[in-house]
Image: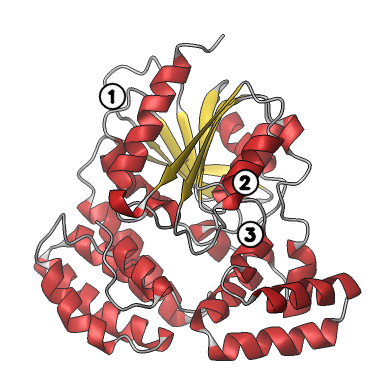
Amino acid sequence: MFHAYTGDEQFDLQLNRFTHPELDPSVKGDLAEVIPQLRTAGDWYPCWSELARRREVAGDHAVASGYWGAAAFYEPLDSETKRTAVAGFRREFYAGWDGPELERLEVPYAGSSLPALRIRTAAEHSAEPLLLFGGFDSYMEEMAGWLRALGDCGRDVVIFDGPGQGTALMRGLAMPLAWERPVGAVLDALEIERCAAMGMSLGGLLVMRAAAFEPRITRAVAMDVFYRMFDALEIRLPRPAGVALESLVWCRASGVLDAAVSRLAARDHDMAWKLQQALAITGTDSPHELLYELERWSFAGLGPLVRQDVLLFAGERDQYVPLRRLGQVARELVNANSVTTRVFTDAEHAAEHCQVGNLPLALGVVRDWLDETEERLP
C-alpha cells in the first residue's frame, strides 16, 4: 500500500521505497519518529543513519539496509556520507538475505567490472533466464530484494549494476546510451544465449535500446515505460518553463541554461536531486553540458528496431513519466512481435513510479506474462 506520509511527492515515494511497514510493523514507530524531522533533503542522512545503526545493533538487517538506502539517497556521490550509507545498505542487505541461492559475480567491462548477482529461483531452470537492471539511481541489491514479490518464477534471474548505476557508478563508470554494450558483456560472461530482459525506471528506456540491438534478448519489459530523459526534468515544471528550457537547449544558450537550472535547483529539492544525480551518471560537469547530452536520451527512432514481445507498464500518477508516453511507445513499436500494456491505478495502490506501493501486483503481472509468452517462443 502506498502511503502519503508528508505530501511531498518525492519524499513520499522514497519513504515508501525504502521502508516497508507491511513487512515489519515495528517500522511504523520509526516512521512516526523520523517523518517530523524530514524538513529538507539535508535531514535525510542524519535521521536515517541513526535509525539504521539502531537496527543493525538489534540485528534487524533487512530493515537496516532500507534505512541506509534512505540515508544515501540525497547525498552527493563523492561524499563520505554517501560512501558510508551505501556500504551500510549493501552490508546489511547481504547480512539479512534469506531468499534463494545468490551468486555474486564480477563482469569484465571497459577496463573495470560490473557487479552482478545470479539468483536461483527454482530447483529446475527450464525457462529462459530473466536479466534485470535499474535506471537512474538503482542498486542491484535493492532489486534483488524485490524478487520476494516475483516469487518462484521457474527461471534464474541475473541482476547487474550497469555503468552509471550502483557500485559501478562509484567505480567511475558513466552511463552510456548504448546499453546493449553492458548487456552484451553480461550475457557473454555468463554464457547466456537467450533471455528476457526487464528495465526499471530509466531502465524502461535502456531495455528498449538493448532489445533493438541485442538479438539474444527475446522479450522486453519496461517497468515503467520511459520515453526520454527530458520528461523527468520537465514533468513538474509549468508548461511555459518547459518550453523555454528546451528552446534554450536548442539555441545552445549555455550561460543562461546554467543560471536558470541552478536557480531551479536552489529552490526545489526534487530538481536539485535530479540535477545532482544526472551530472554524476553522465559524467558531465555543468547543467548546460548535461542538457545537451540528455537530448540524445530518447526512444525516438528505436521503435521499428524492436522485434521482440514487449510488456509496457505505466502508473497513472507517475511523477517522472507522463502517462501519454505509454501509448506513444506502443504505437512506435511497429515491428514488435507483440505489445502488451498495463496501466496501474490508485485503487491498486500501484499508480506511482515503478508501482512502488504494490510491487507484488506488478511483479505478478510480469511473471504471468513471461509464462504466457514463453509458450510462443520459437
Rendering coords of residue 63 (x, y %): 21, 63
Looking at the image, the residue that sits furthest to the right is: 251
Mark number displayed over residue 122: 1
- Residue shown at 51% from the left, 53% from the top: 201
Front one among 320 and 66? 320
Residue 18 in sight from this viewpoint: yes
Tell me if residue 213 comes above or below residue 238 in the rendering.
Answer: above
Rendering coords of residue 103 (x, y %): 36, 38
Q: Which residue is mark 2?
A: 206
Mark number displayed over residue 182: none
Residue 213 in sight from this viewpoint: no
Query: Is residue 317 found left or right of 206 in the rendered image?
Result: left
Label 1: state its secondary structure: loop
> Which of pointers 2 and 1 indicates the residue nearer the eye?
2
Rendering coords of residue 22 (x, y %): 16, 56
Query: Is residue 167 found left or right of 180 in the rendered image?
Result: left
Tell me if residue 56 comes above or below residue 353 in the rendering.
Answer: below
Tell me if residue 98 comes above or below residue 271 in the rendering.
Answer: above
Mark 3 or mark 2: which comes first in sequence?
3
Residues at marks 2 and 1, CA–CA distance in whole angstroms: 28 Å
Mark 1 or mark 3: which comes first in sequence?
1
Query: Is residue 112 found left or right of 73 in the rendered image?
Result: right
Front one among 35 and 351? 351
Q: Are marks 2 and 1 in contact (CB under 8 Å)?
A: no
Kind of residue sitting beneath label 1: Ala
Q: Which residue is mark 3?
A: 173
| 10 Å crowding of disc 3: few (<14), some (14-19), many (20+) | many
Residues at marks 1 and 3, CA–CA distance in whole angstroms: 33 Å
Kind of residue sitting beneath label 3: Leu
- Residue shown at 30% from the left, 41% from the top: 361
- The answer to which image quadrant residue 282 occupies is bottom right
- The answer to which image quadrant residue 95 occupies is bottom left
